[in-house]
Amino acid sequence: MAITWHFLLLLIALLPLVRPTPDGTEETKNEDIYEFFTAHNDSWVYNTTENNTAGGPICRHDVLVNITNEHIFFQRLINNSSGHLLRGDFMNWHDYANKPNDSMYVYGEDGRCWVLQY
């Protein structure tokens, strides 16, 4: 009973934080992924939602190698393993022709591609 009461209080406290935009449209942010990477030479990811076949959490460390307005090259270290050189191509997920860029296509050494959205 005490757990249910605590859950109800938590739900009531958090409910005002979850609300739709006034006109019902999707709210988009104008954050620039290029600015994020130029401000941070290193970025860390721990316990991501990405699929992990090995089980435990993923600890990933990306180290900036080179960056331009269109591309980024970075060294990826996973769980203290040796690094892999990756290339990212910046883009705007919602409007490909315009900026700011909020996403990037990431290409691995093996040619595989995936999307990172900021």
Image: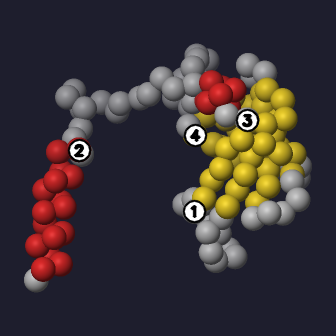
The image shows residue 51 at horizontal and vertical percentages of: 62, 66
For disc 4, the marked residue is 117
Circles 1 and 2: CB atoms closer than 8 Å: no
Answer with the quarter of the image where residue 93 lies: top right
Residue 102 in sight here: yes
Earlier in the chain: of badge 1 and badge 4, it is 1
Residue furthest top in the image = 98
**How far apart are the alpha carbons under marks 4 and 2?**
23 Å
The image shows residue 16 at horizontal and vertical percentages of: 17, 45
| Badge 1 element | loop
Earlier in the chain: of badge 1 and badge 2, it is 2
For disc 2, the marked residue is 17
Give the crowd class for mark 2: few <14, some 14-19, many >=20 residues within 10 Å: few
Give the crowd class for mark 3: few <14, some 14-19, many >=20 residues within 10 Å: few
The image shows residue 6 at horizontal and vertical percentages of: 16, 70
Residue 91 in sight here: no
Tell me if residue 117 comes above or below residue 8 in the rendering: above
For disc 1, the marked residue is 47
Q: What amino acid is at disc 3?
A: Asn
Earlier in the chain: of badge 2 and badge 3, it is 2
